[in-house]
């Protein structure tokens, strides 16, 4: 399990590195380079718009790769999705700026961002099922949290490299070519990820489906027909996690540097410190999910996010590094209380024959609802001299919608595990 979970973590870390490095570049440099004819605000909005295209592509990727995963196995998904995302990310680093090729530059950027999202849409389902379908029932939450730790690792890799380059280079050098280096580094990371996954075995669940002739012929159609309500509820439930994460890691960077005059290196360090703690806490929260259930933690996380958004904005507004870090950390701890367990929760909600498609589409639908528009909407709402309370209200509203969706979902922790836990609690000391 450790070898399998490690291969899963490495892959998701690399995939999310590819995805996140674009978000950081969009917040810092892509607007002036690829949309120079726009005003500074409009350029930032346009850069975040191309960022959002990746989220729109993710459900399509989950449909495409989910079909592969449910028809031909989870393992091919792990390899193909990683290769696609890695190649697209390297290509982003090679796109000439608007000053060189004009309108072709943002068009190429848009296309490559779409391909990034397509690959990432397939990655999560394959990586999570690799661990969830191999794991013992009583530790499924723990092992499935390994791919959920990958986004934190990917974010730290992407932003650590951005921070180092930003500190080592002049503003002119960073804007000219320095921001491209993290995109080029994605090629090396993708090769290392493919090497780590080269000997991964197919999951027992899928081997059983294939041997018994029980594979779904049209997984997407079956999910929509038989599990449409579940699909919408899981997408709505996960929306707050995406909204909070990208508000902290993408919008706050642009807001702090553009509106508050915070040095970009300082703000990157604040966000990275909060994300590092989030990554360390993820497996610990997953263990609680194995013991107390998935749904209670998801409800608690949604509720925590709903009450922390106004303090988050207030703490960001101080421009004090320690207080900004505290604000980001509080938001991410609320988010990880949900996302640490969804690696086990979503696969358990869907039957094995359509599990790769259902879990992946539900997960990435939440990305569209919560992540695609958040940087754009938050940037527009934050325009003006006063505190951006509109951003806090927007995020709080999403948290309340997600809370309602989680309330309508069932508990999935295996009955055998729940029964054993109850017997242990009732036994005399």
Image: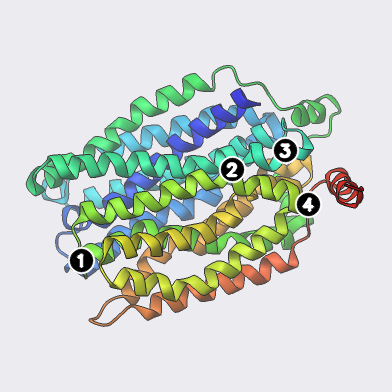
- Position of residue 352 measured from the top left corner of the image (x, y, whole percent): 77, 40
Q: Tell me whether circle 3 and circle 4 mark residues in contact (CB < 8 Å).
A: no
Residue corresponding to mark 3: 139
In terms of secondary structure, where does tag 4 sit?
A: loop
Crowding at mark 1 (Cα within 10 Å: few <14, some 14-19, many 20+): some
Residue drawn at x 34%, y 28% as measured from the top left = 187
Above-or-below relation of 366 to 405: above
Residue corresponding to mark 1: 258
Residue corresponding to mark 4: 412
Residue drawn at x 32%, y 55% as measured from the top left = 270
The reply to whether residue 232 is visible in this rendering is no
Quarter where residue 258 is shown: bottom left
CA gap, disc 2 and disc 3: 11 Å
Residue corresponding to mark 2: 283
Q: Earlier in the sequence, mark 4 or mark 1?
A: 1
In terms of secondary structure, where does tag 3 sit?
A: helix
- Position of residue 20 measured from the top left corner of the image (x, y, whole percent): 38, 47
């Amino acid at each position: 399990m450790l070898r399998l979970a490690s291969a899963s973590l490495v892959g998701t870390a690399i995939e999310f590195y590819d995805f996140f490095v674009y978000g950081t570049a969009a917040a810092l440099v892509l607007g002036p380079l690829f949309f120079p004819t726009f005003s500074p605000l409009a350029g930032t909005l346009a850069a975040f718009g191309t960022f959002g295209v990746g989220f729109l592509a993710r459900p399509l990727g989950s449909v495409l790769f989910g079909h592969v995963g449910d028809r031909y196995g989870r393992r091919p998904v792990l390899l193909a999705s990683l290769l696609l995302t890695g190649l697209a990310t390297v290509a982003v680093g090679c796109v000439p700026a608007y000053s060189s090729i004009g309108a072709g530059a943002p068009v190429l950027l848009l296309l490559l961002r779409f391909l990034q999202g397509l690959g990432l849409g397939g990655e999560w389902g394959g990586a999570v099922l690799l661990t969830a379908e191999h794991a013992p029932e009583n530790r499924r939450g723990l092992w499935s949290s390994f791919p959920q730790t990958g986004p934190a690792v990917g974010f730290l890799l992407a932003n650590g490299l951005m921070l180092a380059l930003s500190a080592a280079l002049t503003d002119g050098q960073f804007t000219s070519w320095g921001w491209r280096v993290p995109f080029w580094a994605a090629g090396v990371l993708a090769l290392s990820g493919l090497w780590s996954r080269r000997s991964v075995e197919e999951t027992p669940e899928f081997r059983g489906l294939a041997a018994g002739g029980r594979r779904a012929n049209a997984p997407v159609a079956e999910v929509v027909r038989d599990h449409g309500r579940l699909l919408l509820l899981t997408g709505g439930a996960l929306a707050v996690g995406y909204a909070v994460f990208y508000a902290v890691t993408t919008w706050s960077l642009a807001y702090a540097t553009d509106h508050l005059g915070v040095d970009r290196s300082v703000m990157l360090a604040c966000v990275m410190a909060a994300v590092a703690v989030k990554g360390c806490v993820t497996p610990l929260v997953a263990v609680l999910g194995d013991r107390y259930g998935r749904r209670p933690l998801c409800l608690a996380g949604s509720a925590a996010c709903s009450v922390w958004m106004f303090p988050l904005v207030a703490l960001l507004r101080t421009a004090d590094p320690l207080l900004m870090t505290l604000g980001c950390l509080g938001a991410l701890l609320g988010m990880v209380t949900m996302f640490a367990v969804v690696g086990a929760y979503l696969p358990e909600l869907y039957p094995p024959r359509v599990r790769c498609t259902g879990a992946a589409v539900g997960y990435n639908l939440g990305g569209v609802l919560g992540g695609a528009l958040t940087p754009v909407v938050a940037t527009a709402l934050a325009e003006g001299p006063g505190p951006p309370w509109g951003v806090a209200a927007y995020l709080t509203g999403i948290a309340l919608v997600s809370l309602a969706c989680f309330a309508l979902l069932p508990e999935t922790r295996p009955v055998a595990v729940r029964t054993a836990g109850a017997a242990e609690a009732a036994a005399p000391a």
